Image (cartoon, helix red, strand yellow):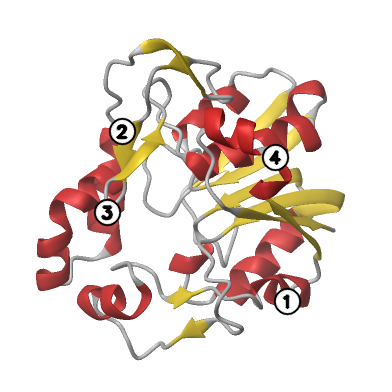
Amino acid sequence: MLDDLNRRLAAVQRLNVPAEAVYGRARSEGGTVLSPARGGTLHCPVCDGRFRKFLPFGLNGRRNARCPGCGSLERHRFLWLLLRDDYKLLRRRARVLHVAPEPAIRDALAANRAIRYVSVDLFDPTADRAADLAALPFPSGAFDTVICSHVLEHVADDRAAMAELHRVLARGGRAAIMVPLDLTRAATFEDPTIDTAAGRNAAFGHPYHVRICGADYGDRLRSAGFAVRQVRSNMLSAHYRRIWRINRTLVFDCRK
């Protein structure tokens, strides 16, 4: 997805290309992962591959970011560790809703027969259901686990989307929610009058983001009814952050 956005960023901003034109195409084409240089000290916990180096990724070409085996990024690997070890998704039966699924995590979960896995995306034709996150086509309490990573910063009415995620989560269920955070900002910054790709890129750092999520974003999730725990990647030792290539990130572990 970001591979395509990297290549097309100038045109996206100049022509105000709608999100569906980029995301629908990128997701339907799928990601390209280069041949891995296997056998090194770096380890991807998602695909269990070992490599001499990871690949660059992102609008600024972050070094050692993308697993050459499964395509996972830093945040995906930390999210996977939480789902595997804390949520224990691979050790129990669960009904899982995955919003805008990351292919590496999607493939690992969908292959587990104990998991009733459903993916949803507004643009991706390979998802199980196409739906607006603010109006999900599922009954209340339909899922034990919800995964929603780097989606809400794209959603105009993120409070309505949060309310829907809370509604479809079963009582006692957990939602792993991630957004790009700027913790130096006390308050989330958004401005609905900024409605072009170029304007959003200048204001929010991405042509399809509609806000910069600040230190108060957990409170926004609490207002939707969740009990929220912040799980930070620095809980891992420096050694494992280095070999798993996990940067500083945070997951909102939301319970109903």
Q: Quadrant of residue 255?
A: bottom right
Q: Earlier in the sequence, mark 2 or mark 3?
A: 2
Label 3: how many Cα within 10 Å (few below 14, some 14–19, many 20+): few
Q: Residue at x 55, y 16 (%)?
A: 48
The residue at which mark 4 appears reads as 236
Residue 252 visible, this orientation? yes
Image location (x, y in percent) of residue 159: 62, 76
| Quadrant location of the N terminus in the rendered image | top left
**How far apart, in angstroms, are the residues tagged by discs 2 and 3?**
18 Å
Q: Does residue 108 appear left or right of residue 123 in this picture?
A: right
SS class of the residue under badge 4? loop
Question: Which callout, 3 or 1, points to the residue nearer the camera?
Answer: 3
Q: Does residue 83 appear left or right of residue 196 in this picture?
A: right
The residue at which mark 2 appears reads as 30
SS class of the residue under badge 1? helix
**How far apart, in angstroms, are the residues tagged by discs 3 and 1?**
29 Å
Q: From what the image shows, is residue 234 above or below residue 220?
A: above
Q: Which kind of residue does numbered mark 1 sit on?
A: Asp
Label 1: how many Cα within 10 Å (few below 14, some 14–19, many 20+): few
Q: Which kind of residue does numbered mark 4 sit on?
A: Leu
Image location (x, y in percent) of residue 240: 63, 31
